Image: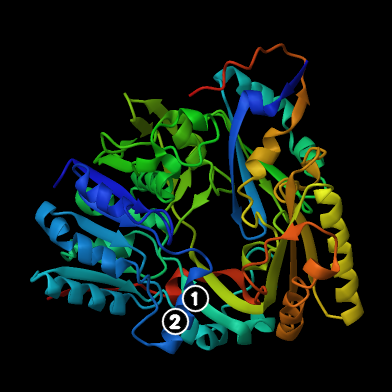
């Protein structure tokens, strides 16, 4: 059993820096590469892809990445954990097996964690008296049930740890907590019990620090962004974990970016609620017990983390279709840029009203003036240019589509010195609304299978 | 004296549905009590008038010298429903740091905006 394990973050989201996983594998010693691919809306997109083609429904970027890295991963004995399996982790595994075969790699064990996809079981679960009410608003699900596109339970680290115990070198999961990807190797390597709350909480905190990739190592750093060196070659964060639950956050030597107490603090505060109750399926971590200390250049020590048992529920993330949006933009230039953009907005709104199109919301922002800070934006001076950005949302596809035809005419029928319509008419996008709910842990169980070629 | 929050704190923001969170971190240990005393949920709610339509919750993290704020109904519906350019509230950290606070204590920030 190891007394120390190095876990490297390779992707903070689907769409993150493509070279990061390779740099983590090549740039120095690591034991695990963990990659988070799933945002809230991703699952419904993947469900749609699987409906069109039953062999799809996972993060397809993973396959060329594994194709590139597999020989090196085998040579360096690095294991991979990712939730990029989406709604079809078995198909993802098979695609990686095919890549392994191309490289002549034999005896590769890949673990799959499934069972999180409860979309086909919704009627049965409702029949069993599980309400699946919206955990934020308390609303009954009956009104949206027929529009539900995806429904996935968040599993934690335990099923991944089981796959590792059964010999998996790569673990592909469906919906798993981001933090579980990092905690699982610690549970496996150190033999932590599933009731060792303080250590599970320490691993969970490490997972939270790693889950957004370089946001812990100098990216998006508000305290002093100018002081971050060489972001072009930013090193993604690495957690060095010890068997006693001690964690050091660092990055490979010679990479860009910065790991400091301040960069780690910013990431700890990212997307959290009540810091005393960071709830996961593995434990509840108390972020008010975390102690951070500098431990030399680009090293931050994380200690003192306390945890307690998790709740009797799993979180379920559901998505449903809820109408359409479209956003159109036009650029107005000096002189009187903002005044002309405002006039164009008024003309557009009058035309939309004349057409009697039913929208739930029409929103106007002036990019370059107030699109980010709204009424807090300082009074504009003489703007050289400003982007008029108008968005609409409604249940009617036709109305939203019709809105898209009202933008371009403003070029010849509105105020002067306007440009920026090369992209064509704005097209309606589906609103994929999010429905969080709770489900008793006893109603679902993770399915772990480890297959070897 | 009047100080800019930007000079005594740094921040990061993100989203959970239609709720944004803003973590505000004291640039120096001695600034944390100022945040606790002056950066109240009520003041933050007033600062974000017209942006945050729901309630504001505040949590304290003395161990990190930080406060965490939850801004409810701040993202135009959140996710793919929102029509905002900043649908995920990424720039609300900066919007928070625009705040100015009238404090009784004397501090000399300015050169402290370093790592």
Considering the image in quadrants, where does the C terminus of chain A appear?
bottom left
Q: Position of residue A272 (x, y in %)?
A: 55, 48
Q: Position of residue A145 (x, y in %)?
A: 62, 84
Determine the residue positioned at 71% across, 53% down.
B72
Given contact means CB atoms under 8 Å apart, are the residues at marks 2 and 1 in contact?
yes
Q: Tag on residue A45?
A: 1
Determine the residue positioned at 63% across, 17% down.
B110
Residue holding disc 2: A49
- Subunit that carries the residue with mark 2: A
Q: Is residue A427 left or right of residue A78?
A: right
Residue A395 location, quadrant: bottom right
Residue A414 location, quadrant: bottom right
Q: Position of residue A277 (x, y in %)?
A: 53, 47
Residue A174 location, quadrant: bottom left
Q: Residues within 10 Å of mark 2 (few under 14, many from 20)?
A: some
Q: Is residue A34 left or right of residue B41?
A: left
Residue A290, above or below A367 = above
Question: Is residue A191 visible in this depiction of the protein?
Answer: no
């Amino acid at each position: 059993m190891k007394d120390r394990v190095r876990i490297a973050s390779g992707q903070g989201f689907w769409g993150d820096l493509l070279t990061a996983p390779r740099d983590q594998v090549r740039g120095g010693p690591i034991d695990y590469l963990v990659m988070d691919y799933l945002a809230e809306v991703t699952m419904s997109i993947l469900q749609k892809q699987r409906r069109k083609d039953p062999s799809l429904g996972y993060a397809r970027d993973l396959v060329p990445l594994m194709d590139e890295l597999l020989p090196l991963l085998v040579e360096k004995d690095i294991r991979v954990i990712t939730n990029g399996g989406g709604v079809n982790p078995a198909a993802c595994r098979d695609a990686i097996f095919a890549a392994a075969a191309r490289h002549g790699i034999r005896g590769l064990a890949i673990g799959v964690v499934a069972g999180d996809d409860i979309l086909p079981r919704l009627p049965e679960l409702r029949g069993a008296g599980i309400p699946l009410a919206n955990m934020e608003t308390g609303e009954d699900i009956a009104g949206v049930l027929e529009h539900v596109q995806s429904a996935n339970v968040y599993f934690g680290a335990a099923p991944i740890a089981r796959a590792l115990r059964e010999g998996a070198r790569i673990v592909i999961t469906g919906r798993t907590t981001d933090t579980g990807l990092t905690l699982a190797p610690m549970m496996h390597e150190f033999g932590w019990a599933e009731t060792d709350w303080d250590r599970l909480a320490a691993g969970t905190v490490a997972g939270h620090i790693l889950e957004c990739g370089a946001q812990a190592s100098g990216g998006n750093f508000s305290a002093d962004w100018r002081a971050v060196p060489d972001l072009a070659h930013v090193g993604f964060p690495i957690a060095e974990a010890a068997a006693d639950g001690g964690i050091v956050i660092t990055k490979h030597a010679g990479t860009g970016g910065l790991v400091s107490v301040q960069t780690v603090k910013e990431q700890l505060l990212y997307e959290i609620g009540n810091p005393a109750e960071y709830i996961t399926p593995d434990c509840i971590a108390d972020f008010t017990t975390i102690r951070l200390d500098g431990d030399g250049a680009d090293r931050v020590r994380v200690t003192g983390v306390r945890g307690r048992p998790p709740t009797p529920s799993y979180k379920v993330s559901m998505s449903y279709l809820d109408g359409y949006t479209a956003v159109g933009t036009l650029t107005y230039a000096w002189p009187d840029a903002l005044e002309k953009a405002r006039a164009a907005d008024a003309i557009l709104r009058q035309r939309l009203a004349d057409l009697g199109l039913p929208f739930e919301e029409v929103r106007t922002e002036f990019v370059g003036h107030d699109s980010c800070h709204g009424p807090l934006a300082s009074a504009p001076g003489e703007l050289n240019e400003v982007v008029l950005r108008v968005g609409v949302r409604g249940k009617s596809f036709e109305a939203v589509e019709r809105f898209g035809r009202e933008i371009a005419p403003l070029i010849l029928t509105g105020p002067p010195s306007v440009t920026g319509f090369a992209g064509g008419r704005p097209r309606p996008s589906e609103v994929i609304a999010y429905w969080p709910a709770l489900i008793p842990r006893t109603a679902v169980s993770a399915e772990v299978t480890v297959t070897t070629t | 004296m009047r100080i800019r929050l930007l000079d005594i704190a740094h921040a990061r923001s993100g989203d959970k549905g239609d709720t944004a969170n803003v973590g505000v971190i004291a640039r120096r240990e001695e600034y944390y009590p100022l945040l606790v005393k002056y950066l109240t949920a009520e003041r933050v709610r007033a600062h974000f008038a017209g942006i945050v339509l729901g309630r504001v919750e505040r949590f304290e993290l003395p161990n990190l010298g930080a406060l965490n704020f939850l801004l409810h109904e701040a993202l135009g519906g959140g996710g793919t429903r929102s029509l905002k350019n900043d649908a995920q509230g990424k720039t609300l950290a900066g919007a928070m740091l625009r705040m100015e606070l009238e404090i009784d204590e004397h501090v000399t920030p300015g050169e402290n905006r370093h790592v």
